[in-house]
Amino acid sequence: MAQTHNLGFPRIGPRRELKFAVEAYWKGEAGANDLLAVARDLRAANWQHQAALDYVPVGDFSLYDHLLDTSFLLGHLPDRVARLDGSRLDNYFRVARGRSAGDSDAHAVRAGEMTKWFDTNYHYIVPEVDADTQFSLDADELLAQLAEAKQAGVTPKPVLVGPVTYLWLSKSRDESDRLDLLDRILPVYRELLDTLAAQGVDWVQMDEPALVTDLDADWRQAFEAAYQSLGAAPLKILLTSYFGPLADNAELAAGLPVAGLHVDTVLGNDDIESLADTLGEDRVLSLGVIAGRNIWKADLSELADRLQPLADRLGDRLWLAPSCSLLHVPVDLDTETELDPEIRNWLAFALQKLDELRVLARALNDGRDAVRADLEANAEAVASRRASRRVDNPEVKQAAAAITPDMGKRHSPYAERAKKQRAHLALPLYPTTTIGSFPQTKDIRKARLAHKRGRMNTEEYAERMKAEIRHSVREQEKLGLDVLVHGEPERNDMVEYFGEQLEGYVFSRHGWVQSYGSRCVKPPILFGDIKRPKAMTVDWITYAQSLTDKPMKGMLTGPVTILNWSFVRDDQRESETCMQLALAIRGEVLDLEAAGVNIIQIDEAALREGLPLRRSRWQEYLDWAVEAFRVTANGVADETQIHTHMCYSEFNDIIEAIAHMDADVITIETSRSNMELLDVFDRFAYPNEIGPGVYDIHSPNVPDPDQVVKLMSQAARRIPGERLWVNPDCGLKTRQWAEVSPALKNMVAAARTLRDRAA
Ligand code: GLN
Ligand code: ZN
C-alpha cells in the first residue's frame, strides 16, 4: 500500500494569524506567551488537517524562518546576538530583524542577511559562518513540538534542513571554506538523530534541495561523507530533494546509505523506474506528485494510471507527497467564496492538495471504485479547464505568434538615442530621480481598504490618490529632483495592480503566501490568455505630469516580474505566457508615449530570481526573458527614454543579458555593498546609463551627502560620469516621509557637488 506524507504545511494560518500575532508581539501589544499560544494553536490545527496522512511533518512550523530555526537548533547564532542577554525568543527576532520586542537601541543589532530560498519567492536568513564557527545541539524547541505532535495523535516525521544544504546556503564571512565545517556540524546532526530516535521517531525528513543544483566534486563528496556518517543513526532518513530534477546527481543521491529518497516529479523529470531500480528491494521511493508551488488541480486519474505499475511493484515502499513543502501555496481554497466559481473549480490550495493526495493513494491502494466520486469530480474540473473558452483568446495567441525580432529593437543604437534624449529632456549631469513609490501612508492604505470594501466610491478614492500625487510632486520639486515620479499611491502591489486590470487574471481574497518573516504576498492567478482591455496607468501619469514642468517618469512593471510573482498557468510554456504579458505592457508603454510621457520605467525586480537552478538552463531562460522585455520596451521613439529597475545587483553572471535589454537607464541596488557590486563593470563595459543606488531604502538611516559623493565617485571610476544617475536603491513605499525627505535632500546635495566637481 502506497503511503502518504507531507513535506511541510503553511505556517501563517488561513487568515494570517501568525503574522498578526508576531507583529503584535513586536509592537509590544502582546506578550511572548500570547504569541507562543497562537503558534501552538496553529500547529495543532495544521496537524489536525494532516491527520489522515501516514506521516506528518513536525518542525516545519516557524515563527519567522525555518532556516533561522535550524541555526538555533544547531546552536549557531551570530556572536553579536549571542552576547546579548534576553530570552531565546528575543535573540531569535534580533537575528531575524535586528531587534526584538521592546528593544532599546542599545539592544538592536544588525539583522541577518536575507535571501531567496532557491528559486522561490520565500526568503531565509542566511547562516553566517567563519573558520571559528562552532555548533552545539539545542533541540528543546523541536522536541517540544514533537511532544505536541504526539499529543495530537499523528505519526510525526521531523523535518530537518540537511547538513550539506545548510552549509550550502550559508555564507562565509572570512575566506574560509564552508565545507571545512562539515566535520564540526555532523556530530551535532548525529546527536540530534540519536535524540530523536530516543523519542521513538521512526523517520526523519532530511531536506537536501541542494541536490537539484549543480554540485562540484567537493560538494558531492560532502554528501557522501555526510550520509555515510548519518546513515548509521538508529532511525530512518528520507533524503528529500525538490524544486527540480536530480539529473546528474541522481546516482549520487540514490547511492547514499539512507532509508528513502524523495524526488520532485512535478518540476523534475528524472527516470523514476531507474531510480526505483537503484534503490533496490528495501528502500523507500517518495514521489512528489502534487505540485507544491502551484495552485492548479492535479489530474488524478492520469496520475493514478501512471503510478499504478510502480505502486504494484513497490507496495508500501512507494510514498506519495506534494512535490515540496506546501509553504509556497495558500492554505484553504474553501475560504475563497468570492472567486469566480468556474475558475475556483480548477484550483487546489494546501488543504485541497492534501485531499488530492488522499484520493490518489486510495485510488492506487483500494482501486478506482473506492474513490469513484472524487475521481469523477476531479476529471470534470480538469476537463472544464482544458475546454474553457475563457482560457483562450485567439486574437491574443495570433498577436503573440506574430511578434518579430524587429519589435524588440530600438530605431537607433544607444549613443544616438542618448544625444536626442539629452537634447529633448535637458537634464543636468548626474541627474537625480527615485525608483517610483513614495511612502504608503496610513491614509493611503485606509482609503484603499475603504474603496475595496465599497465604503468609498471610486471618484472620492481617485481624488484622495490625486491629493497624494500632488503632495509627492510638490515635495520632489522642493527637493530639487530632476526626474519626478507620481509616487504610486494607487498601487497596492506592483504586480497585483496590473493583474487586476488585465484579462486572464483572477484574484484570491485570502490566498496569502509567506514571503519572509511576517510578510506575506498574495500572488494573482494568471489563468488565461492575457489582454489589456484599456490603458492602466496613463491617467495617473498624465495627471502627475500636468502638475510640473519637470519630466515625469511613467512607471510600469515588466512582463518577467509579473510572471515570476504570479501563480502561472501550467498549460502552456512560461515563455509564451510572458510574451503575452509583454504585448500587454508594450501597449501601455506606447499609450504613455502617445500621451506625452518622455521617460518610462519598466521594473524587472524579479528577472534574476527566475533564473533556473541549473546553469545549463540559464541561457534559454534569459533568451526569452530578455526578449520579452525588449518587446515591451523597445517600440518607442529614440527620444523616449526607457528606464528599468532591478532590486539586486548580482549581475556578474548575467550582465551581458542585462545589457542586451538595451534600456537607456538601469537603476540597481548597490549601496549596501559599498558599490562593490559594481566590480562587474571592470570586466564588462556596460554601454548605457546606470543609476547605482546610493541610499539603502531598507534602513531608516539618512545618508550623509559626503557618503553619497564617495559612492558615486567609486562608480565613476568604472562608468563615465555622463552616464551616471543618482538615485536610491529601490522604491520608498515602506519608509516615512520624515526619513525620505532629508535623505533625498542629501542625495540631491551630493549630486550638485558631483556636478560642480565635474565642471
Ligand atoms: N517602482 C517600484 C517602487 O518604487 C519598484 C519596486 C521594486 O523594485 N520592488 O516601489
Ligand atoms: Zn527595487
Image: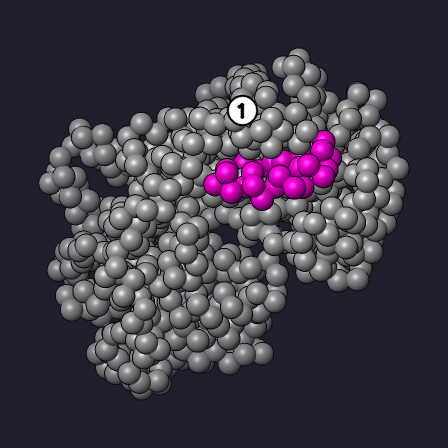
Asked if residue 611 lies left or right of residue 757, the reply is: right
The C terminus lies in quadrant: bottom left
Q: Which residue is depicted at the point 18% across and 65% down?
A: 591
300 magenta-colored: yes
Residue 73 left/right relative to 721: right
Point 80% across, 59% down: residue: 218
Which of the pair 197/429 is nearer the observer? 197
Q: Quadrant of residue 179?
A: bottom right
Q: Is residue 462 left or right of residue 146?
A: left
Write the start and end of the magenta stretch as one range: 299-326
Which colour assignment does the render follow? one colour
Front position in the image: 446 or 186: 186
- Residue in the picture at 19% in, 54% down: 533
Specify whether residue 743 is in view: no
Residue 301 shown in magenta: yes
Depicted 203 relative to depicted 496: above or below? above
Q: Answer yes or no: is residue 632 visible.
A: yes
The percent coordinates of residue 688 (x first, y second) are 41, 78
In the displayed structure, would residue 376 be above or below residue 215? above
Q: Majority secondary structure of the magenta segment?
A: helix
Q: Quadrant of the N terminus?
A: top right
Relative depth, front residue between 290 and 304: 304
Q: Position of residue 331 (x, y in %)?
A: 46, 30
Q: Which residue lies under the disc numbered 1? A: 370
